[in-house]
Image (cartoon, rainbow, N blue to C red):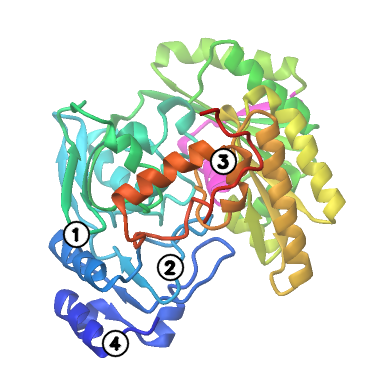
Amino acid sequence: MKFSPRILRRLSSIVGREGLLYDPTDLQVYEYDASLEKERPGAVVLPTSREEVIEIIKLAWKEKIPFVARGSGTNLSGGSVPPEGGLVIEFSRMNRILEIDLENLCAVVEPGVYNLELSNIIAPYGYYYAPDPASQKVSTLGGNVGENAGGPHCLKYGVTANHVLGLELVLPDGELVELGGKSGDSPGYDLMGLLVGSEGTLAIVTKIVVRIMKIPQSVQTFLVIYDTIEEAGESVSAIIAEGILPATLEMMDRTVMAAVEASLQAGYPLDAEAVLIIELDGLPESMPRLSQKIRQICQHHGAREVRMAQTPAEREVLWAGRRGAFGAIARVAPNYLVTDGTVPRNHLPQVLRKVKEIGERYGLIIGNVLHAGDGNLHPLILFDERNQEEKERVIRAGMEILEVCAQAGGTISGEHGIGLEKIAAMGLVCGVNELRAYRFLKETFDPLNLCNPRKVLPSQEIGEGKEAISA
């Protein structure tokens, strides 16, 4: 779609000339996110207020222009890739923290605020925002809401949905809706539960009320080293089974550690097959007992060494390595596909073995980073997109990994969403009737199919994969 001069003039009148992009060179920057997908939009608008967003969406509704909301474009499943020739509503200029309310333990923010920025601003008051995706330096809270983002600390503190108290939304026809707020549970249907994680397919978020938390009094961080990835996986299940709930329980394998060490020098052992990063937080009085128990469990399950960070600086280096893992992979290969599946914790060892077998069968290098505590795998399948045959093998391998996750009683996404890349895998976990219910919701909110179209749901009902629920 090429936007007519009339539409461009109308968009310019809403956001100003500086808030409208339509030159092909500018548009090229917005045709992709962190996935493998690409589509060229027809125009990009950068609103500064909810009023401008409302006017933009009313225009899109009237002219039947498909649109997508976009933050920093860090999405890993193609969720923020624009509809071809459609409109990108880019929220980098709606980036204000509107209120910090310590009495009610919440903050009110616009969708373009960076995740880490919020924690940095409230840290002097002794508070932080718990959901912490690895991209938190650049990912926006609006995008986090769209994907129901998690992060290492979601094991103990939950994902974005557990920390969103209220939303201001613009529906696909331009109607403004407010859900929830500072007062807690609201009567009626749990529409926030529906909207958080809906990948921008039902409405556009213009304001968010988030829960903030007191910084823990004491934190201890461990690097636990293993000679097999299976022993590391067994330790994860054993820790949780013991009734210990760490703040984080992360895993990395040899491939990822080597890339991180070459890039960031985080102190990971290059001769190990896997490491766990375990963090405990809470009252100072409880730390010695819990720390000793963690050591005993890990050593019982084959850990060759348990290191504890002795200073905040040592702790930060360990976490810098984990957060920088995806970027460091560029030292190994120019591209990767991350298949974000989730399985029951006790199935981690066998699923990881199968992931390794899939890589060997397809002749591909796969590095593993896991939110191991909640069974969330991030196998990074490495390749060079200039090699089309290799790329096709990567896509097939990724689908097989998702099949393994589903067969193990898991699902096809923990936090990265379905977007464009995983639509074909929806039949692995959804039956015909489930997909019909999802489509009913989509059509109710967005009858013209303008709001981030072609995402999440297959284009037609499918009967293969999981059996349909009996009528």
Residue pictured at 80% horizontal, 56% vertical: 364
- Quote the CA–CA distance across marks 3 and 4: 52 Å
Q: Which region of the structure is painted magenta?
A: 303-324
Q: Which residue is label 4 attached to? A: 4
Image quadrant in which the N terminus is located: bottom left
Q: Tag 1, which secondary structure? A: loop
Q: Secondary structure at mark 2?
A: loop
Q: Which residue is mark 2?
A: 82
Marks 2 and 4, how far apart at CA = 18 Å
Q: Is residue 306 magenta?
A: yes
Q: Position of residue 45 (x, y in %)?
A: 28, 73
* Camera-side mark, 3 or 1: 1
Question: Is 416 positioned to the left or the right of 282 in the image?
Answer: right
Is 258 displayed left or right of 176 in the figure? right
User: Disc 1 residue type?
Assistant: Gly
| Residue 336 or residue 433, whichever sits in front | 433
Tag shown at residue 174: 1
Q: CA distance from mark 2 to mark 3?
A: 36 Å
Was residue 14 drawn as part of the magenta stretch in this picture? no
Between disc 3 and disc 4, the foreground one is 4
Identify the mark nearer the N-term, 2 or 4.
4
Between discs 3 and 4, the one toward the N terminus = 4
Residue name at image x 22 percent, y 59 percent: 173
